[in-house]
């Protein structure tokens, strides 16, 4: 599909939605011009975040990162560098591509310089911005939605700190 048609048919509805303050956008398993959306930097970063001014977060579809590359670490790098901010992960401990693998690989990718610390700071900032708008910084989030996996992830050591304003 040519970009003009793509913008007229598929991007146009996002303009109003972004302007109205939607909190997140979920990528899909689709492709555009042969590139899977979970790893499509042009659409996620250049168009959605840049041209449309979307300042909230982009979340993966369920295990969508896993479909980018046979190597999980490489798939994470592709998705994060494309502009994905939050990943919905398929598996728990002891299974391939678990959230523990994600945290370990993410730390390695940042230390190796393959995912810039600034990109991680941006992702965290976007997620925290929504949490703050929902009142989570004041303890008003529903505790019932927190799972043991989230507790483990949210308290895990992370390579670096978030800097700057939310």
Image (cartoon, rainbow, N blue to C red):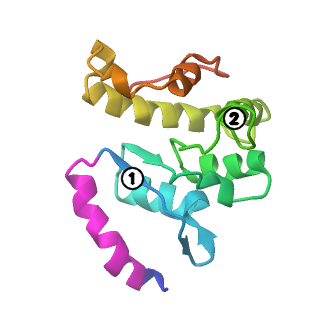
For the residue labelled by badge 2, is the local secondary structure a helix, a strand or a loop?
helix
70 vs 164, nearest the viewer: 70
Q: Is residue 16 magenta?
A: yes
> Dividing the image into 4 quarters, which one contains the C terminus?
top left
- Distance from disc 1 to disc 2, alpha carbons, whole Å, reads 21 Å
Q: In the image, residue 22 lies at what x, y percent?
A: 27, 49
> In the image, what residue occupies the spot 45% across and 48% down?
58
Using residue 125 as the reference point, say whether residue 114 is left or right of it.
right
| Circles 1, 2 touching at the beta carbon (< 8 Å) | no
Please rate how many residues cluster around mark 1, counting C-alpha atoms within 10 Å: few if below 14, some from 14 to 19, many from 20: some
90 on left or right of 101: left
Crowd class of label 2 (few under 14; some 14 to 19; many from 20; radius 10 Å): many
Disc 1, SS? strand
Name above or below for residue 133 compared with residue 152: below
* Magenta stretch, residue numbers: 5-22
Q: Nearer the viewer, residue 153 or 164?
A: 153
Image x and y of residue 152, in percent: 58, 20
- Residue 99 placement (x, y as % from top left): 64, 35
- Tell which of 157 and 125 is nearer to you: 157
The disc placed on residue 106 is: 2
At 54% from the left and 50% from the top, the residue drawn is 83
Q: Which residue is mark 1?
A: 25
What numbered label is drawn on residue 61?
none
User: Does residue 97 lie above or below 133 as drawn?
Assistant: below
Residue at image x 64%, y 41%?
Answer: 91
Residue 15 location, quadrant? bottom left
């Amino acid at each position: 599909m040519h970009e003009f048609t793509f913008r007229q048919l598929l991007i146009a509805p996002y303009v109003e939605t972004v302007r109205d303050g939607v909190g997140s956008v979920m990528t899909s398993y689709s492709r555009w011009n042969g590139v899977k959306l979970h790893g499509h930097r042009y659409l996620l970063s250049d168009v959605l975040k840049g041209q449309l001014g979307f300042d909230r977060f982009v979340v993966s579809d369920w295990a969508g990162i896993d479909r980018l590359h046979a190597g999980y670490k490489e798939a994470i790098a592709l998705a994060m560098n494309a502009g994905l901010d939050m990943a919905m992960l398929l598996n728990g401990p002891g299974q391939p591509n678990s959230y523990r693998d994600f945290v370990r690989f993410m730390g390695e990718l940042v230390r190796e310089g393959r995912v810039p610390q600034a990109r991680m700071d941006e992702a965290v900032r976007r997620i925290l911005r929504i949490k703050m708008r929902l009142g989570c910084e004041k303890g008003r989030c529903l505790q019932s939605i927190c799972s043991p996996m989230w507790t483990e992830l949210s308290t895990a050591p992370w390579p670096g700190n978030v800097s700057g304003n939310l």
